[in-house]
Image (tube, helix red, strand yellow):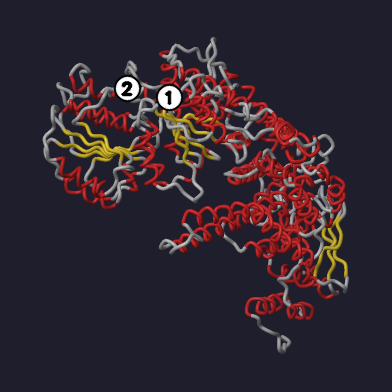
Amino acid sequence: MAVALFGAIIGQERAIEILQRAISAGIQPDGSQAMVQSWLFTGPPGSGRSHVALAFAGSLLCDQGGCGGCQSCHLVASSSHPDLEVIRTEGLSLKIDEVREIISRASWEPSSSRYRVVVIEDAERLTESAANALLKAIEEPGARTIWLLCSPTVEDVLPTIRSRCRQIALVTPTTEAVAKLLVREEQVSESVAQFAARASQGHIGRARFLVREPDSRFRRDEVITMALNLNDVAGAMAGAARLMEIAATEAESEASERDEAEREQLANALGVGATGKAPAGSSKALKDLEKEQKSRITRATRDSIDRALLDISTAYRDLITVQMGVAGERELINEHLRETIVKRAATATPEEVMRRWEEVMATRRSLKFNVAPLLALEALLLKVRF
Amino acid sequence: MVSEVAPGQGPIALYRKYRPGRFSDVIGQDHVVTPLTNALASGQVHHAYLFSGPRGCGKTSSARIMARSLNCEQGPTPNPCGQCQSCRDLAPMGPGSIDVIELDAATHGLVDDARDLRDKAFFSPVQSKYKIYIIDEAHQLGPGAANALLKVVEEPPPHVLFIFATTEPDKLIATIRSRTHHYPFRLVAPALLGEHLTKICHQENVQVAKGVIPMVVRAGGGSVRDSLSVLGQLLAGAGEEGVSYEIALQLLGFTDGALLDDVIDALAAHDAQAIFTTIDRVIDSGHDPRRFAQDLLERIRDLIVLSAVTSDDHTAHSLFRQLPDDQLERMRAQSSRLGNNALTHGAQVVSDGLNQMRGATAPRLILEFTAARLLIPTTGDEALLARIERLERNNGIAVASVATPAVPSAAPPAPPKGEVKAKAPTPASVKAPEPKAAPTPKAPAAKIDSIDVVGLRRLWPNVIENVKGRRRLTWTLLSASATLATVDESAITIAMVNVGARDSFLRSSSDEILREAFIEVVGLDRKIEVIIDPSVNPTASAPAAAAPVEESVENSTDLNSLSGAALLAKELGAKVISESPKE
């Protein structure tokens, strides 16, 4: 049985084993329970839910069970397979109208393959009515329809959905697995890969980003050192301002290239710059795009702040590890800053660090409720200075 | 009840394969099935039913059985013949009948759909007795649609019957509910579910090791469909020799009991090293941190229950029937080592941690955070109580109950420093004994072997408060002009501001009162001695005292008038302007 499609996935051996059985049973029905029609993939962000789901989908569509070389596999890779439908949303939710449309298409006979596969990448974004509309479809789907839903945790979907699906729980890949992947695919040195794997806590996308952008590594260190050496009010205020700045830079650097390309594409499509009158509504379309890009930047900034706060909490975690005297055989997440951490650990008590950790977590929560980020950060840093 | 898979069917999940086809196959819903069967047998069928209940307990299946039983050629009968056209059409996995219309309210919940339904309802059934509408997920009916159905649900044509099925009956408008017979379905009891699963394993011809079925039942949470989904997963992973316990444990991701034991033991021993090593093991062996936290929470819950029934051996055994005796013994030891407050605090922390793991970027970090919080309680009442409990245990002061006062030793493990710690042990040890300070005087007295003046001073306000209940005069004297000076093996020494105060204190035999108060609050039986110390500032330790009282206390020689003046000053804010000597 070919396994090519699963080759790129790391650290999920257990899940893949189950899926492999399902694929063989799906291609050659043997009356066993290995294959069912509705699946729910869960796993923390960065563990590769959608990749696993797509590899599974590709394998079901391929006659050889995912050879990676046939026409079907190529079509899947270029996301143009006629029997594969991937639903993902950039927006905040998946609405019922979209779902109804998917359901009606899902019951069609497959055109060229054994199955028709529908992948919903963000099942947690289904609105309540949309999720309810799915219930009947995933409980008793058409004879050749396979549903693959993905969500971070099972609590993110309705219990009635959960109960109809077979669950595949993906795990956070181990540090070694991530580091190995980075060395193999990003051609970086062992030590950088180790660092990125530890710092990203198994989030593969984040680890790649840390490896590809050396600046992001420096920024991360800067944030952590700042948090560890925070002693006075002035430092706290300056630190908060700097955090905001860093977040803005990161969001900018992610967005700027894509935004420009998008704008150009749209302008081209609308015929801006050509001779003659521009079509009606073209300036509004451009404005809408800009607005969307802006809200995307806001979201990216917020994500980046959240990442910075997580980075700070890794430092606190290290502090406590040192203070509890278990740092000897356990690796620190910020191993390269060990000296600073050990020094700081001696001047504070675990209770104090714990309280700071709690403050950081509380701030992460309140940021989710749309608190003004700078204010929240200032308040936080004032509270966590040593 | 096994049905052949129709040709051309795709893979069939167990919960579809073993859908019940008659009421006698529905498990665990006797309170619903019996009345329905009786109604069918006697022909007293209502025109609209509402089936509600949690996921996967048989609502939709029962609705279909109802339809099958009604439309059977021999019907209405509780035992559909299974031979006639209608019975074959409506069998589980059958093609369906033209007269039984199953609607998904979530996709057909608009008012137009309802109007359409209403119009068509008046046509006679094609080949059966009844035209039956099964409206599934009825909670998703829009308000317009539900209202449009009202008239036809209330007075349908004689051949029409409605069955609503929903997980959330409260969301259905009241006017629909009032027109239906409401049958609430329930989750299925574990024993019954286990039996059912065993039967299915038998029919599937799969060997299942002992202990696997209870695990499936636990994972299914009482829902038949959930349990069958899980069972299907296990059967899929079964090898030649069937489903072994280890495979099941691994496939379901349940945490090995030994890992939980390790964490709990380490927690009781307050061993950070062991806890973090166990967490490393959990992660490295590919366990899901969430799952682990969930299992840990369940274990803590079990321990709390155990500590509640600790004296009753029989109850404990019947509550934890599924546990082997040695495991039960181990858990008992764990629960008594940890103590109630540590357990509730632990449950609180772990449950918080679970909430934070929802969609969290780094579940492992959160798990470590949770573990650290278990070890280092910081804020909150539970944390403080857990801390006190630990202190008490460490000091070897056996306590009758949680609230029994005890003297904290001079040096708590981590000496207070900084803001967090300053507030941690001090107010707690003062506060905690206060509300329920009524233990028997003798019990704690004998146990205290080390006493220190710092700990006693913290309890001083409580002692004074206790004195207040005994004699107001003594209380006034003490709160106005005395502090605790020293304590040793033979006596407790209090310092009073001046000779006058001391004299009235001794004259009124207040020392005896104070001694009794000490016995009751602290459990310390010592002689009371009084010294004079003009530098004493009692208001620092006893804020209740009012300055003017002091004056009258000193000058007065008469017991009654003294107490009266003091009382007036205290309760009414009176000031002594002048005093006329008595004859």
Badge 2: chain ID: B
Q: Quadrant of the C terminus of chain A?
A: bottom right
Q: Which mark is residue A113?
A: 1
Residue B533 % position (x, y): 88, 71
Task: Judge from the rendering whether residue B210 lies leftward or rightward of residue B200; answer left or right.
Answer: right
Name above or below for residue B241 compared with residue A45.
above
Image-based side of A13 in relation to B457, left or right = left
Which is more foreground, mark 1 or mark 2?
A: 1
In the displayed structure, A36 sits above or below B149; it is above
Label 1 to label 2, Cα distance in Å? 38 Å
Q: Quadrant of residue B132?
A: top left
Viewer-side residue, B288 vs A248? A248
In the picture, measured across the screen, residue A299 lies left or right of residue B20, that is right
Say which mark, if any, is on residue B25. Answer: 2
Quadrant that contains the N terminus of chain A = top right
Q: Given contact means CB atoms under 8 Å apart, are the residues at marks 1 and 2 in contact?
A: no
Image quadrant where residue B558 sits: bottom right
Neighbourhood count class around disc 1 (C-alpha, 10 Å): few under 14, some 14–19, many 20 upward? some
Q: Is residue B531 above or below residue B332?
A: below
